[in-house]
Image (spheres, rainbow, N blue to C red):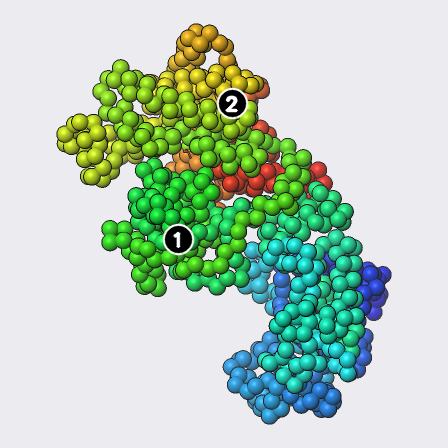
């Protein structure tokens, strides 16, 4: 048989390969090479299984002959990557009337009937394709029930249950080979990253009956906890000696280590327990992975049926990888490669415990990861009141606006009906590290009556407790058990290793001192985007801002802005101080002014009082400022050109803060960024004004400083005309949120409504606000970077849209030679790890697709 590469007995020197016989067959061979007690096993190659599916059965008698006549066999799938799955294992092949009689004497009729009935059921459903309902009703361990089951099989299949082990084996192999070819199995494995033509191998293994006078049973054991990754023996063991008569439903669960709930495996079979620990440690060392051992104990003796990677939570994945490297089993670079960068953000937030019961009320778009529980509130004011009472709350809004930011600060989580990955709630939520679900249009929002209706018709009212899981997008009833964030030593160690491998910078988008502190704690190399407008929503500033908007002359505006100046200067001093000399890129004011004006009647009344104006004046003014399409209206640099006093005040605040902060230590070089540019002349006008403010501050203070001016490329035209814009500036930073919006003509605030339809129907492969559209928006990025750099060698190029924290988008930016990416503070670790993995993958010649 060993001459046929498609059907091989697994021995230490059999010519087996994972890409021909699958990962399980290869792993079993490794266990054999380690001299572990593995039962006799035959491996069938991908080719053999493919032929079986096509109706060409190999010589099964030859396979069958490898095993003793009395042996029961099992068949298990062996795909190239174990994560791609495969058809379920079929056990107890070889059970027939004669085996049943023989086992009845040794085991008792109940246990023998259970073994036979289960096989008949599995064979009938998977091989003979009979209706499973026909076999329901009888307890499996009843001999009478078994007889009825065999009769039912004969009636339905028009033939008696096959008695020959070879025939049974043929049937099982055929059904498993065909199951792999089915459409749903193919789609499922492709979703897990398998190529369309992925092959399936099968392994036929002798079963160890687990019968005898001494301790017998079966179980799994691993040396690490799958949830925490901490070194701890975990697993489960089912002792047949203890629960023999009740095999099946009532069998006793026996715990692995000493446990008050019952006798442990350690107590029942101390030698076997020690042997298992030794074997697991050997597998960990030699297979270079934390392995789960599947075993059988027969008369106190251990048999190892299989070894698989310990299934693991994201936090366990980090700890396991770091411990393997610290124990010298794998190099640190490999540990970095073994952690899925996407899953790291889960470690930075509280999570719903993986085994907690989840009552899902509805789902939306998980826009900011982490889970939060709280009482429902429907307004920012109610969120602040709730926080004042010390009660956690979930702020529920149709969508959020800048006015809600203070309520968001006070809430434990945010849930909105509208919006997508870059809508206001999503961006602010990620910035604050606040769990957030947007686009939850499955729920009916009735904010006026303070009610939500779930798709199942359940009504949720203010004060009801819900949990939002911003990682999955699920809205859950009540308060499931949570896991705390895991920024432990293992995580820090992994990040340190990642940073030594990385070759693209990672900065954070941070607007407030709190954001900057988070960014600094996550070791961001600087601030890549400070959205200054968020500073104007601080208490005490909004009214001054509104006064400025209502001022009807340039001098009136300048006078009010002079009151905002010291506040802005303090903001920047704080940012510079927290960032300790790392670069800080400050974006000048961006949103349309009317966003600062009250939308409600009562808000307008309050404003009228504060400004000492009639309400009608306030309302008229607000109406006059309304725009049909404000995101394409008077905002960004257009405000800078037409209402220059705001940018002048901001530039002065930045420069004064620069001098004040620099006086204490190394000089600060601030970066100033102009938003929404589409024409060279805009940059020239703003640059002229900022240079003149700089000259005035230098003259007034008698001290020199420099600054770097940059343009935020977020209109397609700015990317196309980068060659004429770049010579005026030190850097270009691509704002891919607006650039995606404008390239597609797709509203970032409204796309959430239909985005899932578009993705499901294959119009978009992914939400382009989440994963950069490399074909379209990406082309503009490449073009802009190339044209900009050709016109201005040494130009710094970066990305500061939300895509900056997405591993696939980082791959694109790295490939295009960007200097750094900038993303929400809580995504900085994801970006650092993803960037390191890209550099390592390139070094060892693995394509990005292979990155975990
Ligand atoms: C962008 O448009 O990509 C950006 C970063 O700016 P904002 O999200 O504030 O519009
Ligand atoms: Mg923008």
CB of mark 2 within 8 Å of CB of mark 1? no
Q: Is residue 419 left or right of residue 150?
A: left
Residue at the location (68% across, 80% down)? 242
Q: Tell me residue 585's x, y (percent).
A: 48, 26
Cβ at disc 1 under 8 Å from ligand 1: no
* Disc assigned to residue 254: none
Q: Quadrant of the N terminus?
A: bottom right
Evaluate whether residue 356 shows in this view.
yes
Q: Residues within 10 Å of mark 1 (few under 14, many from 20)?
A: many
* Disc assigned to residue 374: 1
Tell me the element at label 2.
strand
Quadrant for ligand 1 reads top left
Vertical arrangement, residue 436 with respect to residue 568, above or below? below
Residue at the location (34% across, 37% down)? 402
Vertical arrangement, residue 683 with respect to residue 696, above or below? below
Residue behind mark 2 = 731
Q: Tell me residue 663's x, y (percent).
A: 51, 16
Residue at the location (69% across, 71% down)? 264
Which callout, 2 or 1, points to the residue nearer the camera? Answer: 1
**Closer-to-camera residue (742/549):** 549
* Quarter of the rendering containing residue 152: bottom right
**Closer-to-camera residue (754/256):** 256
Instruction: Report how many numbered discs are placed on residues in the image.
Output: 2
Q: Tell me residue 553's x, y (percent).
A: 24, 17
């Amino acid at each position: 048989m060993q001459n046929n590469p498609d059907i091989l007995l697994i021995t230490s020197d059999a010519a087996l390969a994972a890409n021909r016989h699958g990962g399980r067959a290869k792993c079993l061979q490794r266990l054999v090479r380690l001299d572990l007690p593995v039962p006799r096993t035959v491996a069938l190659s991908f080719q053999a299984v493919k032929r079986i599916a096509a109706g060409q059965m190999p010589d099964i008698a030859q396979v069958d002959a490898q095993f003793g006549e009395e042996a029961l066999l099992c068949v298990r799938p062996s795909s190239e990557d174990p994560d791609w799955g495969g058809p379920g294992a079929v056990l107890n092949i070889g059970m027939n009337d004669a085996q049943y009689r023989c086992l009845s004497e040794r085991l008792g009729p109940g246990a023998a009937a259970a073994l036979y009935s289960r096989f008949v059921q599995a064979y009938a459903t998977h091989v003979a394709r009979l209706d499973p309902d026909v076999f329901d009703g009888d307890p499996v361990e009843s001999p009478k029930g078994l007889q009825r089951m065999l009769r039912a099989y004969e009636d339905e299949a028009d033939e008696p249950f096959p008695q020959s082990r070879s025939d049974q084996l043929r049937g099982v192999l055929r059904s498993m080979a065909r199951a792999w070819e089915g459409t749903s199995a193919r789609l499922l494995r492709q979703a897990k990253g398998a190529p369309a033509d992925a092959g399936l191998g099968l392994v036929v293994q002798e079963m160890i009956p687990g019968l005898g006078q001494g301790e017998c049973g079966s179980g799994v054991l691993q040396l690490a906890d799958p949830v925490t990754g901490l070194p701890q023996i975990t697993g489960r063991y089912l002792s047949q000696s203890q629960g023999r008569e009740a095999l099946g439903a009532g069998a006793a669960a026996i715990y692995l280590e000493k446990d008050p709930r019952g006798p442990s495996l350690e107590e029942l079979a101390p030698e076997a327990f020690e042997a298992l620990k030794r074997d697991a440690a050997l597998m960990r060392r030699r297979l270079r992975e934390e392995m789960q051992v599947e075993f059988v104990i027969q008369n106190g003796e251990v048999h190892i049926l299989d070894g698989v990677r310990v299934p693991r939570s994201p936090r366990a994945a980090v700890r396991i990888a770091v411990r393997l490297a610290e124990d010298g089993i794998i190099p640190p670079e490999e540990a970095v490669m073994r952690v899925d960068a996407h899953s790291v953000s889960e470690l930075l937030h509280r999570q719903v415990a993986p085994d907690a019961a989840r009552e899902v009320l509805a789902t939306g778009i998980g826009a900011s990861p982490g889970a939060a529980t709280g009482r429902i509130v429907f307004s920012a004011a109610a969120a602040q009141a709730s926080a004042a009472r010390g009660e956690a709350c979930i702020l529920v809004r149709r969508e959020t606006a800048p006015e809600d930011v203070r309520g968001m600060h006070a809430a434990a989580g945010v849930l909105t009906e509208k919006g997508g990955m870059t809508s206001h709630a999503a961006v602010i939520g990620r910035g604050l590290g606040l769990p957030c679900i947007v686009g939850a249009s499955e729920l009916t929002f009735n904010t006026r009556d303070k009610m939500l209706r779930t798709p199942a018709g359940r009504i949720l009212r203010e004060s009801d407790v819900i949990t939002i899981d911003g990682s999955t997008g699920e809205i859950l009833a009540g308060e499931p058990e949570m896991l705390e964030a895991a920024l432990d030593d293992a995580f820090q160690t992994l990040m340190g290793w990642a940073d030594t491998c990385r070759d693209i910078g990672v900065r954070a988008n941070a607007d407030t001192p709190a954001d900057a502190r988070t960014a600094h704690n996550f070791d961001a190399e600087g601030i890549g985007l400070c959205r200054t407008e968020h500073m104007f929503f601080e208490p005490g500033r909004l009214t001054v801002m509104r006064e400025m908007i209502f001022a009807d002359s340039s001098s009136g505006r300048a006078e009010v802005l002079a009151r905002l100046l010291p506040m802005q200067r303090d903001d920047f001093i704080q940012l510079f101080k927290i960032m300790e000399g790392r670069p800080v890129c400050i974006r000048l004011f961006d949103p349309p002014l009317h966003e600062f004006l009250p939308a409600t009647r009562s808000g307008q009344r309050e404003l009228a009082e504060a400004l000492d104006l009639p309400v009608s004046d306030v309302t008229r003014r607000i109406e006059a400022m309304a725009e049909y399409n404000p995101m394409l209206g008077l905002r960004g640099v257009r405000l800078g050109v037409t209402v220059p006093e705001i940018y002048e005040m901001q530039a002065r605040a930045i420069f004064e803060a620069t001098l004040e902060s620099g006086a204490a230590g190394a000089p600060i070089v601030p970066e100033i960024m102009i938003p929404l540019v589409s024409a060279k002349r805009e940059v020239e006008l703003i640059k002229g004004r900022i240079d003149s403010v700089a000259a005035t501050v230098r003259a007034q203070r008698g001290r020199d400083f420099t600054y770097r001016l940059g343009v935020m490329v977020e209109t397609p035209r700015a990317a196309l005309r980068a060659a004429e814009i770049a010579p005026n500036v030190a850097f270009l930073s691509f704002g891919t949120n607006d650039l995606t919006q404008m390239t597609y003509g797709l509203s970032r605030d409204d796309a959430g409504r239909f985005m899932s339809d578009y993705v499901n129907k294959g119009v978009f492969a992914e939400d382009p606000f989440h994963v950069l559209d490399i074909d379209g928006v990406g082309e503009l990025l490449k073009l802009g970077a190339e044209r900009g750099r050709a016109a201005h060698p040494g130009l710094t190029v970066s990305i500061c849209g939300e895509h900056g924290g997405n591993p696939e988008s980082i791959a694109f930016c790295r490939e295009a030679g960007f200097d750094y990416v900038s993303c929400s503070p809580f995504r900085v670790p994801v970006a650092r790890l993803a960037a390191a993995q890209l550099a390592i993958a390139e070094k060892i010649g693995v394509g990005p697709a292979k990155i975990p």
